[in-house]
Amino acid sequence: MGVGKPIAVGLGRFTHWGLRTIAHRPASQLPGRVALALDPNVIADLAPKLRRGSIVVCGTNGKTTTNNVLASAIEATGAKVLCNRAGANMAAGVAAALLPGRWADWAVMEADELSTKHILPALKPTYLVLLNLFRDQLDRAGEIDHVQDTIVEALATSPQTTLLACGDDPLCMGIATRARNAGTRVLTFGMGEDLGLAPDRVPEARFCQVCGAELAYDYRCYAQLGAFRCPNGDFARPQLDYAATHVTVDRSGVSFTVEGVQIPAGTRVDASFGGVYMVYNLLAAFAAASLAGCDGSAFQRVIDDYHPDNGRLQHFAVDGREVVLNLAKNPTGFNQNISLLLQDDRPKAVYFVINDDFNDGKDISWIWDVDFERLAEVSEQGQLQALAGGSRANDVQVRMKYAGVCSAAPCVQTVAEALANVGELPKECPLYVLCNYSALWPAKAELEGMGERV
């Protein structure tokens, strides 16, 4: 039995003040843990202070960027928004983000997929944005069908929530089909055209979510995302409510036209960052923002001013060399980063950092599903230098060897060592630093101490 909302909220806010003011530490989780320990219903208790509603962003990859862009877009309308921008995406992080202030117009909250069973029943969001589903941290999350079951069950506890799901992802649409059958309103977004991209070597989902037959595709954009259909007619990509068309993706960023529900013709989104996956993220953010009352021009202003500061596609300059830092935590994330590398036609170096801490997952066998072989040709041409790091650096070395990328990728333990190793490369050649979860923040802190953000 909790001690009640006033004491829980008061002590949660006091913890937040102490962490930020005295300890100068982040306050993204601990205040929420304190509040939940005193009042397990504190998220539900705080939800009524949201005057217009809440949006939860969920999915394997891209949650933090999509969530933060969406929150900024809604703020651009003049609304007051509460958001867990640091990516603390379990119940404690959501509770901590809800603590400040007596009221807000909206809450925009990133949620871990398995935490939806705790967050949705309490928050009862207006919208749940489901970006994608990929294998990730199998020793914690289990197989994808377990994740799907969890999200379906969470939606059943919040019947007024509208699901905004990626219509190109069979796994997301498996959830959407089951949720719609249970009465959930479903909207979809996706790619409205064939980008002419080669399919990934190891797709995440190959089979119909209804009958189990192997899916056919008119085209695939990446992983299992694309225009899919069951040959037996049991399951197919739906008519999209929001579609990206006239898409361009190159080293300078992404650009696309949004077509959809009450979207003025010719509405475009242009961003100076990202790859194909970012088209999906920004399209999802645009769709959710428009549902919350943000128009296209306001959304574009947010994108123009958006500069990643959480280690996702963050750019630094260190002694005249460009360093690009990004998160890569599962096969699909790595494959998309490889696509970004290949779009950059300059000679380059890449530092792969893989740890096996608890929040990474102890099982790293997934690196054998990453299509590192796509880098072999540029490596053979002398256009790519690879380095390995992290607690599983030797595993990365072996994987590089079998991929034909580097017969003996040197092991280094810091970004500074990686830069020293590539010192003979001309300064115009960038270094890409691709890290999984526990390696990302140390690399970010090191780069912030060594160089300047660009």
Image (cartoon, rainbow, N blue to C red):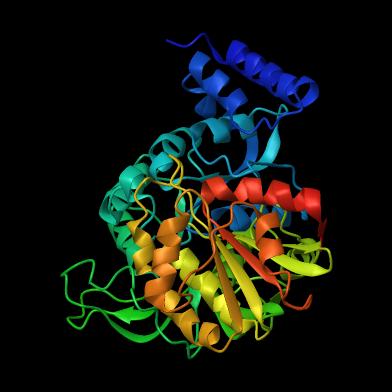
Q: Can residue 238 be seen from the camera position used here?
A: no
Horizontal side of 208 relative to 82 (left or right) equals left
- Image quarter for residue 415? bottom right
Between 196 and 343, which is closer to the camera in this rendering? 343
Rendered residue at 63%/19% (across/down): 12
Q: Is residue 288 left or right of residue 27?
A: left
Residue at (46%, 42%) from the top-left corner? 359
In the rendering, at what x and y percent does residue 342 appear? 57, 82
Residue positioned 27% across, 53% down in the render: 143
Which residue is at the front of the view, 242 or 245?
245
Q: Is residue 319 in sight in this rendering?
A: yes
Asked which quadrant contains residue 326, the reply is bottom right
The total of numbered circles placed on residues is 0
Point out the image quarter for the C terminus.
bottom right
Q: Nearer the viewer, residue 235 or 52?
A: 235
Vertical order, 347 against 136 (above or below): below
Q: Position of residue 168 (x, y in %)?
A: 41, 73
Q: Position of residue 444 (x, y in %)?
A: 68, 51
Residue 346 position (above or below residue 372): below
- Left of 28 or right of it: where is 212? left
Q: Quadrant of the N terminus?
A: top left
Q: Residue, x 51% and y 43% (percent of image)?
A: 125
In this view, the residue in front, 204 or 202, is 202
Residue 43 lies, in percent from the top left, at: 53, 29
